[in-house]
Amino acid sequence: MRRIKAALRMCVVGSLVLLCFAQGRAQGSVGSVEGEPLFLIWDEQGKYGFMDATGRVRIKPQYDGALPFTEGLAAVSSKGLWGFIDTTGRTVVPLTYRGVSPFSDGVADVTVTAASAPYPCGYIDHSGRYVIKPQNKFTCTDFKEGFAVVGVYDEQIGESLDGYINKSGELAIGGGYSRADNFSEGLARVNDFNETYFINREGETAINLKGYAGTDTLSDEYEPSGSFSEGLAEVGITVFSSYGYSRFGFVDKRGKVVFKLPERMRAEGAFHDGRALVLLTKTEKVKVDLGDEVISQEVEVALYGYINSTGALSIPARFSEGEDFSDGVAVVRSGQPRPAFPRDLDGSAAADAFADRSGDWLCINRAGAVVIKKCGEPLSSDELTDKFPMFGEGFGKGFVGGLFFHKTRVGNKDLYAYMDKSGQQLWLQPHGPNVRPPRWWRENF
């Protein structure tokens, strides 16, 4: 997370131009006009503005760069400097910063200009007043539930270790973790080089699953493998003498593993809207064309489904791809089973056996019923990281705020678009011979 954030700040310094969603589950309340969410768009000149959920332009495209609306404010840039506007387009925080992040937990981290790198970062409130003045003692990341994960350089080991600062800028928890996640539902997952566990807001160990299955050397080993969402957190289970997680389960806030998934079922996401994505694997024989002969080869294949909070498979595993639920809807793909471990087949003849197995993208509800027969294609994780690194949770993967930002095919081009829950396309990326792409894309892609 720290590396991603650092890379993002480098992008901001380089006059970052991003398309970001105007609302995200992970980023709190959103900018809106009369209660309606706003969504970022761009025009033929690569300038950014905002539209509402009906596709009506509310803030005319005029900015070189922009970040999502969160907590009623959006970061925008002009001539390489950043500030914040409100939902009417009025400048609330002047465009004076070298780089910024969206507001989270009442504050936004900002980077100021200095004689040389590293450039100092601090935090401002909605009025632009400094809550934590710019400094170089630690990195700046988003606040969640009153704390922000920061990297503090340890001279003894020669690298930065994670800890948590409060809004006074004090190192309130740790400072020696090899990994620390954001707080979620009052708990945070950390690793101290020896084991992974959850801490509470006082920095005390709240849940440690070491020894959960016994202390015998043959006992299975349990450890948290995800953060809490809707009262449950993913657990990875390592069986004696195996490498990596062999099984998965979910733990509650009391530290009790409430259910374990079957051996051939793998957890693929946290709980959202009462559903969690899982992958069900099986062995399938496929015909492999070697050129001079056709052979039969056994391959581990998989289909996606969804479990409920009891661990029951509430939506059968029948999809070749799937995304988390968001806004009561999940984006899935029909088609035959695909390789459970596709990288293992890269470059092999067996990979060709799965080339024509892809189906159509659909949207389903929590009961598993199809609600949109022709849904857009979600963005890949790499695409989100490269082109849209500061997005709300769910952006590009499903519906958020009533719209789905997706890819659609127009002629021989893949273009970005917004779709509503009726399946209607409300906005399509400008395209044509005279269209200027956003500056960030021009400089990096």
Image (cartoon, grey):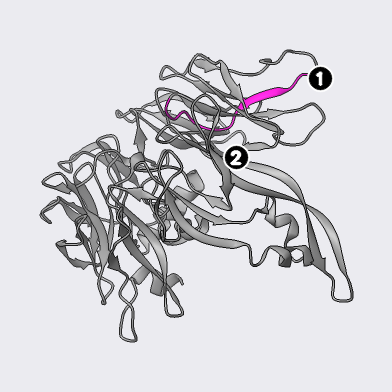
Residue 229's place in the image compared with 135, above or below, is: above
Amino acid, disc 1: Leu
Label placed on residue 158: 2
Label placed on residue 218: 1
Amino acid, disc 2: Gly
Q: Quadrant of residue 246?
A: top right
Identify the element where label 2 is drawn.
loop
Name the outermost residue toward the right. Answer: 292
Magenta part of the chain: 218-230
- What is the x, y in percent for residue 166? 34, 27
Is residue 80 visible in the rendered image? The answer is no
Q: Toward the viewer: 4 or 169?
A: 4
Label placed on residue 192: none
Is residue 267 visible in the rendered image? The answer is yes
Q: Residues within 10 Å of mark 2 (few under 14, many from 20)?
A: few
Residue 49's place in the image compared with 135, above or below, is: below
Residue 85's place in the image compared with 135, above or below, is: below
| Contact, mark 1 vs mark 2 (Cβ under 8 Å) | no
| Earlier residue among tags 1 and 2 | 2
Q: Quadrant of residue 281?
A: top right
Residue 219 on the magenta segment: yes
